[in-house]
Image (cartoon, rainbow, N blue to C red):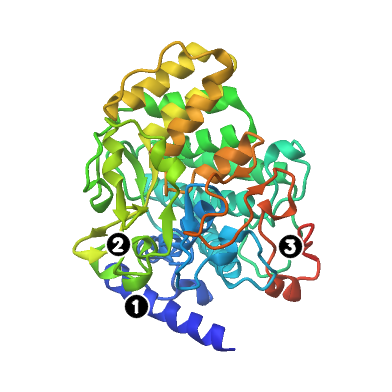
Amino acid sequence: MKKYIIAIAAAGLFMQACSSKLDLKPYDSQEGSDALSDYSGVNAALNGVYDALQSTFYYGRNYWIMTELNADNIYIAASNSNRFLSSYRHDYTTQDADVEDFYTTAYNGIMRANKVIGAVDNISATTDQKNVLKGEALFLRALMHYDLVNVFARPYAQGNGSQIGIAIKTKVDISNAKRATVKEVYDQIIADLTEAKDLLKSVGVTTKYHASTYAASALLARVYLNKGDKVNAIAEATNVINAGYTLQAPNADFYNTQGSAEEIFTLSFVDNESTGSDNMGMMYLKPGYGDARVTPDLAASFDATDARLVYLGMMGTEYINEKYTGQGGKAGMTSPKLLRLPEMYLIRAEANSAADPAAAIKDVNVVRASRKLADLSNVSNAAVLDSVLAEDRREFMFEGHRYFDLLRNNRGVDRKMCGSTLAITAPCTFGITAYNIIWPIPQTVKNTNPDMDQNDGYE
């Protein structure tokens, strides 16, 4: 009971912080006929979907922290505040509060998106206004389904999509739903993003804080790569690369500001949306919890001239993440940059790594040049994929990519600092077939929906 009281109080504080920006009524808890009867109401409801993504339980902090801890970029310091230990150890239970909070938040966001999609055709507005509202909601619904299937279902390649996935929600209802296959989930995600891309064709490169046609294309590139559809991944990545975004030189303030030319989609926080000690950076920094430290092997992978070294600091003898030092004078606060141009080059590089190794290295070198690094040369064909993944690890460290890069390429987690007294005790490796590379369906979901199958190993 204590857990739920704390959760309700925290949620109330978060929504209070958001209300000054969005002035939202709780549309997700209303019947909807009044709230969603006109353009302003539906637009406000759409802002509520973005709000779900901003939750501390989602991109506000937990989702990125948990998935980073699942891999090998960071570890939990031996002296810690007792947060996210199960993520680093992969010893989740069906009662894990962090897992449950993410699951609930993501599906609440999907239901909010569904209300927008269901209401938009019936309001009085221009065709373009309706298209934009619906396109954004479809993009956000796809993103949330994608994030859910990534952590609650096994990688696409492990069953060519035939393995159990997650429940697909495309309508406003509270009825129980069985889990679809991974392929069915991906098909829905791709359908949503394809429609969103077309509906948002009037929303281009200059739009950073809401979904745009290129945000939909960029997310499609990511989805196709994870699915193993390299041809379409290349096509979508190329579409974004040619759109007019520009790679930016790294600097200490890059993650503390918003709106750079390489940002495709950023989840914008304004100053009064700070969650204080629960800001993203507070898990990495002191003062703050400072629990998550950077693995020495990640730090050692950087060349001395790499401009991204500005994002690594020291706390005594340990490396720390200094990407998220603060925004608007709020320590540890950041606006997560969910889609950036470098990813498109590296997606295209990975997709080309076997069929066209030279093209793959050319794209890696584009990213490296913008980070003040010399070109890679004389890379053997067998080493091209490793070169791509190494660059992706450095570029997107602490941004939730590493774990899925490993799983997508049939690689488990191999932690190089295993046994160090600096970290909590945890397994050194997790094989790609281990049951605990994915998370359990929360027991509360099973309790209310007996048809919801549990992941193997968590019964």
Looking at the rendered structure, the secondary structure element under dot 1 is helix
Q: Is residue 49 positioned above or below 197 on the image?
A: below
Foreground residue, 99 or 241? 99
Quadrant of the rendering where the N terminus is positioned? bottom right
Question: Depth-wise, is mark 2 or mark 1 nearer the camera?
Answer: 2
Q: Is residue 137 left or right of residue 375?
A: right
Mark found first going from the N terminus, 3 or 1 = 1
Foreground residue, 65 or 116? 65
Q: Position of residue 70 (x, y in %)?
A: 57, 53
Question: Depth-wise, is mark 3 or mark 1 nearer the camera?
Answer: 1
Per the image, the residue denoted by label 2 is: 333
Within 10 Å of disc 2 (Cα), the crowding (few <14, some 14-19, many 20+) is many
Looking at the rendered structure, the secondary structure element under dot 2 is loop
The residues bearing labels 3 and 1 have C-alpha atoms spaced at a distance of 32 Å
Question: Depth-wise, is mark 2 or mark 3 nearer the camera?
Answer: 2
Which picture quadrant has residue 108? bottom right
Residue pictured at 41% horizontal, 35% vertical: 301
Per the image, the residue denoted by label 3 is: 177
The residues bearing labels 2 and 1 have C-alpha atoms spaced at a distance of 17 Å
The amino acid sitting under disc 3 is Ala
**Residue 259 in view (yes/no):** yes
Residue pictured at 78% horizontal, 41% vertical: 162
Q: Is residue 48 left or right of residue 194?
A: left
Per the image, the residue denoted by label 1 is: 16
